[in-house]
Amino acid sequence: MLLTGLAVAGLSACKSPSADAPVRIGYSAWPGWIPWKVTEDKGLFTQAGVPVNLQWFDGYLDSINALNAGQLDCNSQTLGDTISSIAGGADLQVVLTNDYSTGNDQIIAAPGIKSVADLKGKRVAAEEGTVDHYLLLLGLKKAGLSAEDITFVPLETGAASAAFVAGKVDAVGVFAPFTTQALKREGSTTLFSSKDFPGAISDHLVCRSAFVAENPEKVQKVVNAWFKTLNSIKAEPAASLTILAQRAGVSEPEYQAYEAGTTLLDLQQNVQVFKPGSTMESLPYAAQKISGFLQELGLAKTPPKLDDLLQPQFVNAVP
């Protein structure tokens, strides 16, 4: 979650691309988004009838900044980060749910740290304001601790993982595939993960509201292509795994280990999660809870405007 907020000034001045321009979609190193590479490599955007410029970002936060700056039309990001951007003045809409994180976001600790309580007074690294910072705060709160009980070390996710392996920090919050690197520190263990907070971290395709309003047909075709991608991965698992692992920069067995920790949502599940509910696995409910959390921490001074955030019509119209 982008707990620190982002500068979004000047968005209104961004010019919309022409009708025949490719859709500019950003994505980064998360198992729920890497399948977009399969979409691209197998020509599924073309089959869906939509030109796409798929842009990879080594840093997740960079992709969010690019969307907020109008350099992308859509981006792959979490619900929490999206709401944080909206609190900062961005005008964004969720058009697709890729997955729920069910273990691939982790707080990993050095030998000797056996509980969340043991983090008190320790140096803990994570990328400030992103989803694993959010997970860390959730875990501390559940254990009766606060952010003031630790020494927070803000580092980009890859750098945070490297610092942990080098023994420069006592614990780290990272997401897959960086979890693989962090756990190479001898004796390290996972204290808790997104599996312990069902529905708290959901991952989406998020677009600028103006782009959605002006290009609903393009958005629909992109969403259609995503579900074709999921079908293709099931139909051709070996070929797809090669693409996925190469894009993630890990071995195929390592990538397969991420499957349980990222739960990709099929079409029926997508339709369901957009509906009102009473758990975090309902996006309307989760959005309200995350908004409240931001305000509780003083990171959103006013309630984020959520009325138009969720746009279920695109998953509802997938053929």
Image (spheres, helix red, strand yellow):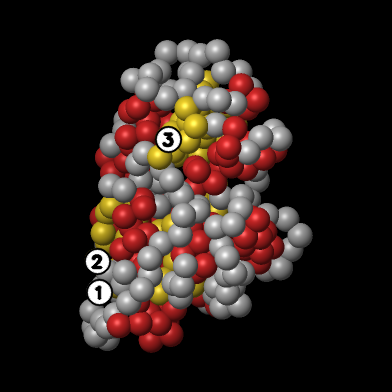
- Between 222 and 67, the residue placed more toward the observer is 67
Residue type, label 1: Pro
Secondary-structure class at tag 3:
strand
Rendering coords of residue 63 (x, y %): 33, 57
The kind of residue tagged 2 is Asn
Residue beneath the point at 46% across and 72% down: 89
Per the model, the C-alpha gap separating discs 1 and 3 is 39 Å
The quadrant in which residue 282 appears is bottom right
Q: Residue 286, image x and y in percent?
A: 65, 59
53 sits left or right of 7 in the view: left
For mark 1, does the 10 Å Cα neighbourhood hold few (<14), some (14 to 19), or many (20 or more) residues? Answer: some
- Kindly identify the residue that appears in the image at 35 percent across and 45 percent down: 29
What amino acid is labelled 3 in the image?
A: Val
Determine which residue is flagged by label 3.
153
Q: Tag 3: Cα neighbours inside 10 Å, few (<14), some, or many (≥20)?
A: some
- Give the residue displayed 71% in from the left and 35% down from the top: 144
Residue corresponding to mark 2: 53
Residue 66 can be seen in this image: yes
Q: Nearer the viewer, residue 236 or 181?
A: 181
* Residue annotated with mark 1: 22
Q: CA distance from mark 1 to mark 2?
A: 6 Å
Q: Between disc 2 and disc 3, whose residue precedes?
A: 2
Mark 2 closeness class: few <14, some 14–19, many ≥20 residues within 10 Å: some
Which of disc 2 and disc 1 is earlier in sequence? 1
Q: In the drawing, does residue 282 fall left or right of residue 65?
A: right
Q: Earlier in the sequence, mark 1 or mark 3?
A: 1
Query: Could you say where residue 9 lies in the image, as x and y percent from the top left?
Result: 36, 73
- Contact between marks 1 and 3 (CB within 8 A): the answer is no
Mark-to-mark CA distance, 2 and 3: 35 Å
